[in-house]
Amino acid sequence: MLLAQYCGVGKDGEKLVSALQLKWKRIKQKTPQWADGMPQVNVACISCAHPLTSSGYWIPEIISSAGGLSLCSKIGHPNKSMTLKDLVESDPDVIVYLCRGLLSGRILFLTCGLLR
């Protein structure tokens, strides 16, 4: 919203933010976990293997909207470094690895190194 104000189109920015918030609310209402009362899935989302880093910012909100509980990061907070011990102690049901621009062979190499 500040960007819209800075560019002199604050009212248009407000309309856009309101429209996106409404769409996001509708998506959350259609998610089966929200509608059916299913238990939350505990999710550890990793954005980098070396150094081991959790996914923050908007990723925990996406996990929450899909019915999960982000174990390693909070909504709106930055990515944070963690240890393998932290990951294990968080006891996730699912570990999601979001690679950024790495080839699959490199991901496998880094992951194998992480698990040694």
Image: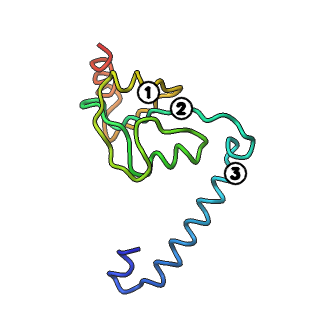
Q: Nearer the viewer, mark 2 or mark 3?
A: 2
Q: Secondary structure at mark 3?
A: helix
In the picture, residue 104 is in which quadrant? top left
Q: How many neighbours does mark 1 have within 10 angstroms: few (below 14), some (14-19), or many (20 or more)?
A: some
Residue beneath disc 3? 30
Q: How many neighbours does mark 2 have within 10 angstroms: few (below 14), some (14-19), or many (20 or more)?
A: many
Q: Nearer the viewer, residue 94 or 97?
A: 94
The mark that comes first in sequence, 2 or 1, is 2
Indicate the amino acid at tag 2.
Answer: Asn
Is 3 drawn above or below residue 82 in the view shown?
below
**Coordinates of residue 85 in the picture (x, y in percent):** 33, 21
Q: The C terminus lies in which quarter of the figure? A: top left
Q: Nearer the viewer, residue 106 or 11?
A: 11
**Coordinates of residue 111 in the picture (x, y in percent):** 33, 22
Residue beneath disc 1? 90
Indicate the amino acid at tag 1.
Answer: Ser
Q: Which mark is residue 42?
A: 2
